[in-house]
Image (spheres, rainbow, N blue to C red):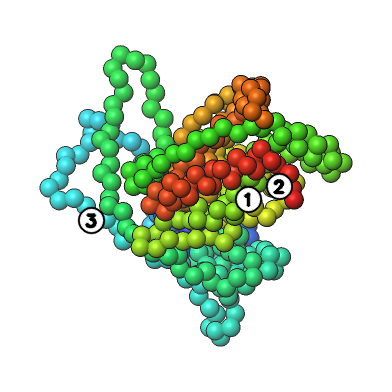
Amino acid sequence: MPIELKMPALSPTMEEGTLAKWLVKEGDTVSSGDLLAEIETDKATMEFEAVDEGVIAKLMVAEGTDGVKVGEVIAIIAEEGEDVSAAPAPKKQAAPAKAEDKPAVTAEAPKPAAAAPAPVAKPADDGSRVKASPLARRIAEARGVDLSGVAGSGPNGRIVKADVEAATPGAAKAAAPAPVAAAAPVAAPAPVAAIEGIPSETVKLSNMRKTIAKRLTESKQQVPHFYLTLDCNLDALLKLRTDLNAGLAARNIKLSVNDLLIKALGVALEQVPDANVSYAGDQLIKYARADVSMAVAIPGGLITPVITDAGSKAVSKIATEAKDLATRARDGKLQPHEYQGGTASISNLGMFGIKQFDAVINPPQGMILAVGAGEKRPYVVNDALAIATVMTATGSFDHRAIDGAVGAELMAAFKALIENPLALVA
């Protein structure tokens, strides 16, 4: 019988997506592991692979369609000779209604659609074989992922590539996250019309921009931010960077200042574990490892790839990972597990000459560090006024989870590591 291909959940938070591009057409023969479409999520554009063999009988959702709910049928695969003429007509991308064509508002608001059920890994009839695509099995074997603990998002609960890449190697099914107190719903702002008389154009928001707007609005409304700012003398750090780069040249590794700042924040979070936390309603989650999210600007928005265990990782390894993650972030090639999570963030606008700024916390994280440009300034060195390369750093903290004294302790630890950087390579 025909197989319904449904919009997959390509990340744990995905509820809907944009079917950006079909990579197949009706009549094409596909096999398990073949790429079918490019789907734009709230974070990136990702590829969707086939898990069954057959012929593309109908494409149910047109290329470029927004707001396709997870679980909605997007295509039908048929075996050779099967009749799919009774299948519903494909869904077309709706054209925006003109202002004069808008229907009158009815007295009764439409009821919200029921949320798609969470995909569950469904075992084979004998209860012992896990249903997974061949590509997913190969990736799982290479990464040491136990498929019995992975929930599948493919048809009939089949495990696909994205499920394996989001799983933790060697781990069983992840425990449910700690409950977080539900926030009061935020009223949607009224539409803003363009100012008359000024030439303008209306640009459609991407899923990423919609998510950024929603999450950061909620952060500023629901998270009580407080800010701590200090100056750091960068001269010793810059000298250490020069010396390390000379030694790493043979390995074709070049450290940036940001690589050393990520390392410093990771070590500082380990030294002040009370700042490496998340607020979760009536609970406080304390992390045993410092995973630092680094803000990377990409076309149309911002994404935060994660340097895992930044406090314990060698700076050369951080440099290699950061360069690779930033490159793939700009190319839209990151996998969900590479940009989800993180216990704290760092945002660096120094390359634009910005001296100081306050960053918005990315929940559920408890803090974000904003760093500005290093510039020559008058600075007291050994009780004497001198000229030094000085950088201003500002920490934004969630006051529900982190007290002022704890935030100050973290900032002091960060400053000490920057001004005495040999501790970063000890």
Q: Position of residue 172 (x, y in %)?
A: 57, 73
As rendered, which of 137 and 284 lies closer to the eye?
Answer: 284
Q: Position of residue 350 (x, y in %)?
A: 59, 29
Q: Where is residue 257 in the image (x, y as percent from the top left)?
A: 68, 36
Q: Which residue lies furthest to the top in this view?
A: 197
Q: Position of residue 214 (x, y in %)?
A: 38, 43
Residue 245 appears in view? no
Q: Mark 2 points at which residue?
A: 423
Q: Which of marks 2 and 3 is nearer the N terminus?
A: 3
Q: Which of marks 2 and 1 is nearer the N terminus?
A: 1
Q: Earlier in the sequence, mark 1 or mark 3?
A: 3
Q: How crowded is mark 3: few (under 14 residues within 10 Å), some or many (20 or more)?
A: few
In whole angstroms, how far apart are the C-alphas of marks 2 and 1? 9 Å
Q: What element carries label 2?
A: helix
Instruction: Give yes or no for contact between labels 2 and 3 (Cβ–Cβ under 8 Å).
Output: no
Q: Mark 1 points at which residue?
A: 267
Residue at 35% x, 37% y is 95
Disc 2 residue type (three-letter): Ala
Q: Name the residue under label 3.
A: 111
Instruction: Give yes or no for contact between labels 2 and 1 (Cβ–Cβ under 8 Å).
Output: yes
Q: In this view, does 200 lie to the left or right of 309?
A: left
Q: In this view, does 314 lie to the left or right of 229?
A: right
Q: Residue 392 appears in which quarter of the rendering?
A: top right
Q: What element carries label 1?
A: helix
In whole angstroms, how far apart are the C-alphas of marks 1 and 3? 50 Å
Q: Residues within 10 Å of mark 2 (few under 14, many from 20)?
A: few
The residue mark sitting in front, 2 or 3, is: 2
Residue at 74% x, 48% y is 425
Residue at 28% x, 42% y is 188
As rendered, which of 93 and 44 lies closer to the eye?
Answer: 44
Disc 1 residue type (three-letter): Val
